[in-house]
Image: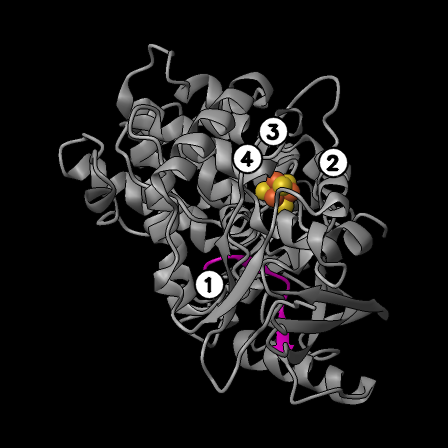
Amino acid sequence: MITPSHSLAGKLQFPLIISHLSPLPSAIHISKHDNDAVSKMKRCKQTESRNKVTTALVDDIEDINFSKKEISKIRAFLLKWYDINRRDLPWRRISDEKSDVDEGRKAYAVWVSEVMLQQTRVQTVIDYFNRWMEKWPTIHHLAQASLEEVNDTWAGLGYYRRARYLLEGAKMIVDGGGEFPKTASSIQTVNGIGNYTAGAIASIAFKEAVPVVDGNVIRVITRLKAISANPKDSKTVKSIWKLAGQLVDPSRPGAFNQAVMELGATLCSVTSPSCSTCPISFQCQALSLSTNHESVQVTDYPMKVAKAKQRRDFSAVSVVEIVEEESLSDARYLLVKRPDEGLLAGLWEFPSVLLEGEADLASRRKAIDSFLEESFGLELNNSCKVILREEVGVYVHVFSHIRLKMHVELLSLHLKGGANFLQRKQQSTTLTWKCVDNKALSTLGLTSGVRKVMLSVVLKF
Ligand code: SF4
């Protein structure tokens, strides 16, 4: 019985198939008449004829390579499949091999789309990408934008640091003469561009034969080679980059890289891969193992690793609504800008205070009152009149490493002089803030936590 072996005595261990994916019946590839590779392979197993698999443990992932034969078959079948099945996406219309758009604009489109795709699903990215390119069609247009505008256009995608890097990178390229660097190594010198994005830009826009490795590529390669090593381990990642580099087709590097990612995003999915229609199933060692050994499933690859435990944070959030005594209808909301570094850098949020832990209502109110007094000299029911103060709910916002539980209240104040009063009384010299109406709230670069609160609190009241 064979099971993918995980860590053994602290070393990376994985089954290496040392033989013998002799060609399976051709119908397994992508035949119309019989494309059920899995059942065919099971029949092969029953007759114990063609696909004998033996395994061995090796302790060095660096020993795994694709043979020349494997490489040429994988390239040919994958590109053929991609040319027929690739999704029509707006950034591909710009960056397509045959499009006559100049390389710099292609590079810019790939860059924007790849950064957005690191945030969310393709379907969501399409609208964001179209809006972005309409607003800033070239890197030169983007370099003229303000961080505020960029954050506003990015709003809802999360992880705003990526949007800031796009802006900073565009300014850097334009300040350096305006020509997009053309190789993966030179592209990586641009602020915020790592090896994945550099590989995507260089291979798609400039046809450099360099690989890309993202989650989809890791999944496809670990399955092709039945690699059962921790995919987060730096040694594994390095080896997967090497294997991806062996596969990338020098004549069509951009198309090939997109083909691997497309396969991972569509057929070779995390939980239910469609091996029966996969164009390279005949080269897939995970499929071969699973076919021959009931205890193995293709979804055993890549190896699952326990997620790091999230930190639990708690905050008191106060949606401070200010109504000037002279103009009762003109409610405005107090927003405070987060520091330029750290979590959600530079974004606007409702006044909030991080708590020591779960705190009762009285403690939360005390924390908010102190913040308002220390920052704005605002003493409730002294320098202003509280019209309404009520708890509106608890919202949980999950970041990659933090689970933030926000206790939210609505605090409605009558304040003589409104924002001018706050201006006069502001105590902190470092705090940046502003008062906006609810219309402006919906267009600002707000944290997604604030957006959540805004939709259910401000627009409800
Ligand atoms: S696991 Fe299935 S879909 Fe993924 S590469 Fe192997 S055969 Fe193709």
Residue 34, position as x, y percentages in the image: 74, 23
> Local crowd at mark 3 within 10 Å, few (<14), some, or many (≥20)?
few
Q: Earlier in the sequence, mark 3 or mark 2?
A: 2
Real-space Cα separation, disc 1 to disc 2, in angstroms = 66 Å
Residue at image point 58% right, 37% down: 282
- SS under mark 4: loop
Magenta span of residues: 345-353
Q: Earlier in the sequence, mark 4 or mark 3?
A: 4
The amino acid type found where label 3 is placed reads Asp
The amino acid type found where label 4 is placed reads Pro
- In the rendered structure, the answer to whether residue 134 lies left or right of residue 372 reads left
Q: Which residue is mark 3?
A: 127
Type of colouring = one colour
Is residue 127 depicted above or below 441 in this figure? above
Q: Which residue is mark 2?
A: 40
Real-space Cα separation, disc 4 to disc 2, in angstroms = 13 Å
Q: Judge by depth and name the residue closer to the eye, 196 or 250.
A: 250
Q: Which residue is mark 1?
A: 432
Identify the mark at residue 118; answer none if there is no mark: none
Q: Judge by depth and name the residue closer to the eye, 204 or 277.
A: 277
- SS under mark 3: helix
Q: Judge by depth and name the residue closer to the eye, 84 or 307.
A: 84
Q: Quadrant of ligand 1?
A: top right
The amino acid type found where label 2 is placed reads Lys
Q: Earlier in the sequence, mark 3 or mark 1?
A: 3
> Local crowd at mark 4 within 10 Å, few (<14), some, or many (≥20)?
few
Residue 22, position as x, y percentages in the image: 53, 40
Q: Earlier in the sequence, mark 4 or mark 2?
A: 4
- In the rendered structure, the answer to whether residue 429 lies left or right of residue 458 reads left
Real-space Cα separation, disc 3 to disc 2, in angstroms = 42 Å
